[in-house]
Image: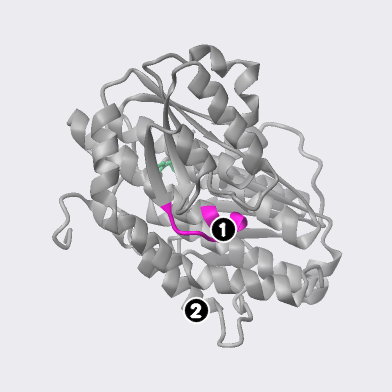
Amino acid sequence: EKAGFETFMLKEIHEQPRVIRGLLDRHLDAAGRIELADLPWDREFFRTLDRIMIVACGTAYHAGMYGRLLLENLTGLAVETDLASEFRYRNPKISGDTLVIAVSQSGETADTLASIRMAREIGCPVLSICNVPGSSIVRESDGVLFTDAGLEIGVASTKAYTAQQTAFILLALYAARLRDEVEPERSAELVEALRRIPDAIHYVLERQDAIRAIAEKHHDGASSLYLGRKFNYPTALEGALKNKEISYQHAEGYAAGEMKHGPIALINEYLPVICICTQTRDEVYDKVVSNLKEVEARNGRIIALVTEGDENASRLAEDLIAVPPTLDELSPVINVVALQLLAYYAAQARGTDIDKPRNLAKSVTVE
Ligand code: F6R
């Protein structure tokens, strides 16, 4: 059942190109048009929408943070993402023209379920991005975008996450088209890049031994810091979460721009700093490189995730993980796979039970 892999988690990491290809085959036609035929809403619905509120927990919350950036960038709508456990106890300003999106692999997470019940009581339409047909969250939503990642057995979520990211890309492009918010050329460019993602992930998977060597070199530290910005800020949070969950090594994800506001005090010659520097066309690229220089000046041990051929960020790093070039907006889908592998091999070096890490449950059905 593990198909020759040593753990379910490693098998599921390797299934990601296929899962994403499946989603694209299902929702992208030959002309590059996205169709989400199962959604119960028409063009008018998306045009009159006022805002979007995304709620989720854990890894799904990180997908929601990424989804927010994409939806905001492409649809022109105001978008917010909140933790379901916070959202349900605050007094959110949502109404009938706020689309509430719940993201959940299992479809059974108690706080996420309670959040959509609250939203529906207020009169909000609810869309869930979910992996399990027939689950509670699916049954209580008005529309569903299935992530179709197949059964995920490893407690640490991997393929469900990249499927959630892909679902958000599809949804953002779809809603943007219905709202006439995206130029056809930009949309075509994104779709073309999207089609190349499965191969790019494959490329990362083929280099897992190099990632393993880096993980083995740094696995025994007390802590590590993950830095990213903009599209890859959620990637940094997700990389740190994976590391914590399965290797039991403390890890912290941070927005790179927040470094000087506190975490820079942690940097010394022992602290591995995993820095995501792949948004090469973005205005934040230079900023990330200056953050790296600050780490270097304090003798931090930099592991940089860079685009192949990158020279600026690479020069500053002790260890490098190179990924194929893509559009900045889409880079998180590829980058996170490298961070999943980094956490995986750190956990292996530390001898933990990777598929069933202590204290964690696959589905959190109580608060
Ligand atoms: C992390 C992980 C958890 C879940 C969270 C939400 O690897 O698996 O953080 O993402 O418990 O679960 P779902 O997506 O089932 O609502």
Q: Residue at x 67, y 55 (%)?
A: 70
Relative vertical location of residue 58 with respect to residue 181 in this rendering, above or below: above
Is residue 330 located in the magenta-colored stretch of the structure?
A: yes
Q: Secondary structure at mark 2?
A: helix
Image quadrant holding the N terminus, namely bottom left
Q: Nearer the viewer, residue 127 or 333?
A: 333
Rate crowding at label 1 as few (under 14), some (14 to 19) or many (20 or more) other CA atoms within 10 Å.
Answer: many
Picture quadrant where residue 174 is located: bottom right
Magenta-colored span: 323-331
Q: Residue at x 60, y 23 (%)?
A: 259
Of callouts 1 and 2, the N-terminal one: 2
Is residue 325 located in the magenta-colored stretch of the structure?
A: yes
Answer yes or no: is residue 259 visible. yes
Which residue is labeled 1 in the image?
Answer: 330
Q: Residue at x 38, y 41 (%)?
A: 320
Q: Residue at x 33, y 17 (%)?
A: 222
In the picture, measured across the screen, residue 186 lies left or right of residue 203, that is right
Residue depth check, mark 1 versus mark 2: number of the one nearer the observer: 1
Query: Looking at numbered disc 2 in the image, what kind of residue is underneath it?
Result: Arg
Which residue is labeled 2 in the image?
Answer: 26
